[in-house]
Image (cartoon, rainbow, N blue to C red):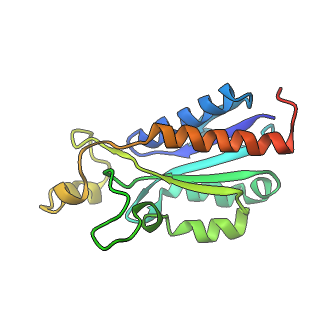
Amino acid sequence: MKILVAYATRHGATAGIAERIAATLTESGRPAEARPVEEVTTVEGYDAVVLGGAAYMFHWLKPAVKFARKHRAALASRPVWLFSSGPLGTDLVDKDGKEVLQETRPKEFDELSELLRPRGEQIFFGAYDPEAKPIGMGERVVRHMPAARDTMPAGDFRDWAAIDSWAREIAEATSAIDPQPQ
């Protein structure tokens, strides 16, 4: 069983998560490769797909959504998992008592759940480097807002243990589909 970990990233943090998922799957006996969605023309040749993207302001990056819609028939015919990265910080609960990872679920996941019937989805904390070159006018404006320091704390908040654990769950789930690692 060969697994594609396709991803859309803006500054590279989501790429790091995808690469870690692919490495953990491979270490677990499930050959996997991480590739940017822009480089994937077909999902043929893959038995399962993990599709991820960064989320900004509650929306998945457009290239990830476009990929899911374009390949929906092929994706719906194989096991699929979705992930998103984006919330910053380490607090699991916000000031209003809401679970941060649930509250930052991309709005597109409802539509994609209907289209693709994923076997699972996961939201991971992301990373933010204020020194990284901003992409687009919106990002430039947000960075200069006084509240940006509070809502966009700098640092790498990716939880590698949680990422590895989720990837191992996928490896286990795929072994139920194809019990013979290749």
Q: Is residue 12 left or right of residue 110?
A: left
* Corner quadrant of residue 42: top right
Dividing the image into 4 quarters, which one contains the N terminus? top right
Q: Percent x, y for residue 109?
A: 58, 66
- For image coordinates 67% across by 44% down, the residue present is 169
Dividing the image into 4 quarters, which one contains the C terminus? top right
- For image coordinates 32% across by 66% down, the residue present is 94
* Relative depth, front residue between 128 and 88: 88
Q: Percent x, y for residue 95?
A: 27, 69
Tell me: residue 41, above or below residue 86: above
Q: From where the camera sits, is residue 47 visible? A: no
Q: Is residue 128 left or right of residue 38?
A: left
Tell me: residue 40, above or below residue 82: above
Q: Percent x, y for residue 21?
A: 58, 37
- For image coordinates 49% across by 64% down, the residue present is 106
Q: Is residue 135 left or right of residue 18?
A: left
Q: Residue furthest bottom?
A: 96
